[in-house]
Amino acid sequence: MATISAEANDIVPPFVIKELTGPRRELRLTGRALPYRPLQFSGTQRVEVTYYAGNPVATSTVTGTEEGDTTIQGKWKDKYIRSAATATAPTTTRGGPATVSNTRVDSVAALVNLVDDMRMAGQLVEVSWGHITRRGHITSFSHTWDNLNDCEWSLAFKWTSQGQRVTPPVVADGPSPVRNLQVMRGSLADLEDIINDAPDTNSISGMLNEINRGLSRARSAMDEYTSTAVSFADNVLGPVGTARNALGLLNGVINGCTEVIDTYSQFAAPEDVFLNPFVDDGEAYIKYFENLAYTTEVLVAAKDLKREAAIEKQIQLQVLEAEVQAVHFARAGETLRDVSRQFYDTPDQWRALMVYNGFREPELSVGDLVMIPVLTSGVVG
C-alpha cells in the first residue's frame, strides 16, 4: 500500500470524520496522517425477488440502494504527527497533519485515544475525502504498536447513505406529512379492498382472522397518523412535534404490513394436487390458482404500503437529525432508567426522556419507540 507523502498534501484532499450527533467533533487527517491508498467505496441496489409456487414468473421489488462497508488502514508515527510541536512542549495551536475541531493532535497516543473514543461514542458520522461523502457509523478500530511512538491502525465504517438528505415535501413551514399521507391512505385502501375480496376457500378462510389483526394494526396507526398530519396542517404541531408523533405510528403501519406479508407468505399448495402427479382434480387446480392470484395481489399491495411508510419514516427522522442522536426500541423488562444509562452513561436522565417522549411513567413495553435527544450542557434540551 502507498502512503500519501507530505509533499502531495497540497493536491491530496484531507480525510475528514465529522460527528453529526453527540460531541460533534471533527477529525481532519492530512499529509503523513492520511490512510493508505487506495480508498475503496462500493454500493448495491437492493432488490427483493419473490417466487410463488406454481408461477414461473417472479415478482420484484426495488427497495433502494445500499452502500458497501469501507475499511481504511494506515500508520501513524510521532515524528510526523507532532509536526512543529516538540516532545517536551507539545502545542495545541491550529495546524499539523491531525487536528480535531481545529486543534492539533500532538501525539500518536492522543490520536488513537480520540479515534477509539469516537468509536465507543457510536454517533452518526459524516466522512468526506474530496468529492466523496458517506454517512454512517464507525464499527471497528484496531491499532497495532511497533513501539510507543509508531502505530499501525485499521478503521471500519458501515454506511447509511452517501451523505444526501432525504428531501421532504416543500411547504412554507417545513416538512409536511400531508402529501405522503394521501399516497399511504390510498395504498391502505387498495390493500383493504383486495383482502376483503378473498376467494371462498378453506385455505384462505383459515388465515383471515390473523390477516385482519395485521390490517387492523396498520389501519389504527394510519388513523392516528392522519390526526398528526391534520394537526401539522392546522399549525397545532410544528415539524419537530410532527416528526416525534409520526415515528411510532409509522412503525405501527410497517409492523401491520409485515404481519400481513408473513401470514400470506406461508401459503402452500394443496398436497393432493402437487405431490401426486396422477391426481386429476380440475376443481383443486382452479382453487389453488385462484388462491395464488389472490395472495400475490395482497403481498404486492402490502409491500407497497410498507415501503411508502418506511420512506416517510426516513423523512421524519431527517427532521429530527439535529435534535435526536438515536432512536431506540425497548426490550423486555427495560425502563427509561436503562435507556438513559445506555445512551448517557447515567440513569439520571430518565425524567427528561419521559418528558421528551411524552410518556407517563418510566416503565416501557416491548417495542416502545424512545427518541434519544442530544444533550446540551449535561441536560436534555
Image (cartoon, grey):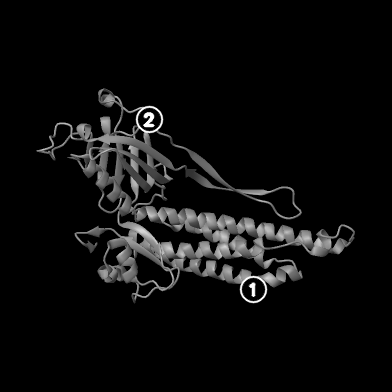
Is residue 184 rendered to the left or right of residue 50? left
Residue at 42% across, 40% down = 70
Quarter of the picture holding the N terminus: top left
Q: Secondary structure at mark 1?
A: helix
- In percent of width and height, residue 128 lies at 34, 38
Residue at 37% across, 63% down = 244
Which residue is more in the foreground, 273 or 302?
273
Is residue 267 rendered to the left or right of residue 278? left
Residue at 52% across, 55% down = 308
Which residue is more in the foreground, 232 or 16?
16
In the rendered image, the vertical position of residue 266 relative to residue 99, given as above or below: below
Is residue 117 rendered to the left or right of residue 207? left
Residue 230 is at least partly visible in this image = no
Quarter of the picture holding the C terminus: bottom left
Q: How packed is label 1: few (under 14 Cα within 10 Å), some, or many (20 or more)?
A: few
Which residue is more in the foreground, 280 or 108?
108
Q: Amino acid at mark 1?
A: Asn
**Residue 37 has which mark?**
2
Quarter of the image for residue 370 reads bottom left
Earlier in the chain: of badge 1 and badge 2, it is: 2
- In percent of width and height, residue 251 lies at 47, 63
Q: Which residue is mark 1?
A: 209
- In percent of width and height, residue 357 lies at 34, 68
Q: Amino acid at mark 2?
A: Arg
